[in-house]
Amino acid sequence: MGEFVRLEVDSGIGTIRLDRPKMNALNAAVQEELRAAAIEAGSRSDISAVIVYGGEKVFAAGADIKEMQTMSYTDLVDRARPLSECLTANARIPKPTVAAIAGYALGGGCELTLCCDFRIAANDATLGQPEVLLGIIPGAGGTQRLARLLGPARAKDLVFSGRFVSAQEALHIGLVDELCEPGTVYQSAVAKMSRYVGAASYALRAAKESIDRGLEVDLETGLTIESAQFAACFATADREIGMASFVEQGPGKARFEGR
């Protein structure tokens, strides 16, 4: 357990909890603890799905600007890649993930939400990539993941303007997937992730790998990735269980073992 980020596990759901008062600013220590929590969550067999959560007041208001203000070009040459990689570790968790967003998710905080498979936000939450207002650009995946999620024109609108986005607009443009009442975002995330507890975990892993890797390549290569992952599922006990259950009882009744 880190000083600012901890991994909590309950009933098959892992929660990566940011807790750096007041605004969960992503300084270097938080970044490295996020990386460690993501790697642990991905490797633990008692975790079927993951929630990334900053509390009911704020998700994460971005990078630690006071820390960044004193950095030189050479400092950022050394730091930029590790920053990107710590968020990529969250994107590479081989299990379903959701960002539970309350309050502000700005800059690096918004980029962290983009690393999750899904995003649930309180209906009074605020998101955005305001880096241009500081004379810089998003540096932890914002220009890349945002464009892949929303398309280039909408991504450019948000990045070029640096404007804040309300929860309602975020839902409209696809930046978040669901809205909920303030104070209920974590419970909503638990409800969403609970459906994956007891699921065919290696099939979910193969599906996530196929979709995510497929988006990075041309269609023909993506189909090759899919074919390999599809075939690999036939090496699992869950495939045998699932097909036998379907033949004998019909769909949706299999009790998977996660192996």
Image (cartoon, helix red, strand yellow):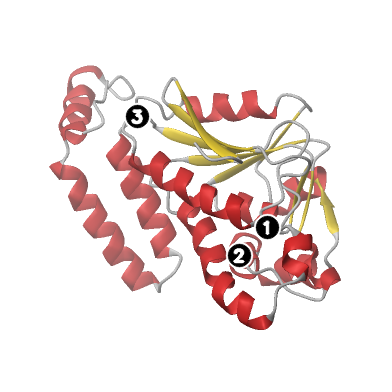
Amino acid carrying mark 1 in the image: Gly
Marks 1 and 3, how far apart at CA: 31 Å
Q: In this figure, which residue is indicated by the disc labeled 1?
A: 108
- Return the x and y of residue 138 as percentages of the image width and height: 69, 68
**Mark 2 and 1 residues: CB-CB less than 8 Å, in contact?**
yes
Q: Nearer the viewer, residue 104 or 29?
A: 29
Q: Residue at x 69, y 53 (%)?
A: 110
Q: Quadrant of the C terminus?
A: top left
Q: In this figure, which residue is indicated by the disc labeled 3?
A: 199
Amino acid carrying mark 2 in the image: Ala
Image height of 238 relative to 82, above or below: above
**Mark 1 and 3 residues: CB-CB less than 8 Å, in contact?**
no
- Return the x and y of residue 209 as percentages of the image width and height: 36, 54
Q: In this figure, which residue is indicated by the disc labeled 2?
A: 140
Left or right for 29, reference 199: right
- Return the x and y of residue 194 as percentages of the image width and height: 48, 25
